[in-house]
Amino acid sequence: MTGTQLRPPIPLVDVDSAPWWEALKAGTFTVDRCQECRRWAHPPLERCRTCGGQNTLEPVSGQGRIFSFIVVRHQSLPGLVPPYVVAIVELDEQDGLRVTGIVRADPEAVSIGGRVSARIDPIGDSGYSAPAFELTPQSDPASPTHALICEAPEEGPTDGGSPTSLLGRPT
Ligand SMILES: [Zn+2]
């Protein structure tokens, strides 16, 4: 029964995304950035959507917050055992710069606004790799980032120790 193990799907690489996948193979998480107006853009595209300038891949921090997510509870793809979380992550580099990836965490611990950091996971034995995310421990447990969704900010002076802005982003 061992030779029949199913493998996860591999990327459908095209002329625009090939350099991005190659960078991931080499262990670098990159995103296209316009060499004229310096805006980031994802998914990869030869030209900037804002000014038409030339895009070039540049490394990103991999730091961001969960913009949205789903929990996959039924087997829908080979090689991926449910339950697992698929998230849209907004990277710190730019408002609206979003990438998708699996969050390697207990689904119960994942929340919108939660801080994550990227790692690069191999896709089975295909030779390809993809960004995945891990939860980043909160620096201030008294100010969970999901509070910006669920709760109004408290009145009065803060303790001055929280680096978390309304966007859940360290300042
Ligand atoms: Zn541009």
Image (cartoon, rainbow, N blue to C red):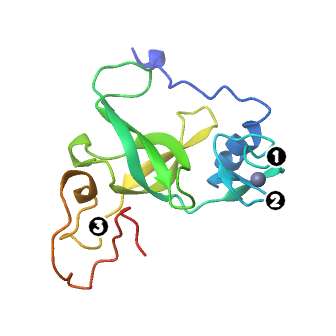
Residue 84 is situated, as x and y percent measured from the top left of the image, at: 33, 35
What amino acid is at disc 3? Gln
The residue that label 2 is drawn on is 36
Q: Quadrant of the C terminus?
A: bottom left
First of labels 2, 3 by sequence position: 2
Q: For the residue marked with disc 1, what is the amino acid?
A: Gly
Callout in the foreground (2, 3)? 2
Label 3 crowd bin: few (<14), some (14–19), many (20+), radius 10 Å: some
> Which residue, given by chain and number where applicable, does mark 1 sit on?
52
Is there a contact, CB below 8 Å, between mark 1 and mark 2? yes
First of labels 1, 3 by sequence position: 1
Which residue is located at x 50 percent, y 40 percent? Answer: 100
Q: Position of residue 105 (x, y in %)?
A: 31, 47
Q: Secondary structure at mark 3?
A: loop
- Residue 41 in percent (x, y) is at 66, 48
Question: What residue sits 34% from the left and 64% below the top?
Answer: 166
SS class, disc 1: loop
Q: Residue type at mark 2: give it.
A: Glu
Question: Rounded to the nearest whole Å, what is the CA distance between mark 1 and mark 3?
Answer: 39 Å
**Left or right of residue 5, residue 57 in this image:** right
The answer to whether the residue bearing label 2 lies less than 8 angstroms from the nearest atom of ligand 1 is: yes
Q: Is residue 167 above or below residue 67?
A: below
- Please name the residue that numbered disc 3 is placed on: 138
Going from the N terminus, do you reach mark 1 or mark 2 first? 2
Mark number for residue 61?
none
The one nearer the camera, 157 or 55, is: 157
Distance from mark 1 CB to nearest ligand 1 atom below 8 Å: yes
> What kind of element bears circle 2?
loop
- Estimate the x, y position of residue 22 in percent, counting from the top left: 72, 44
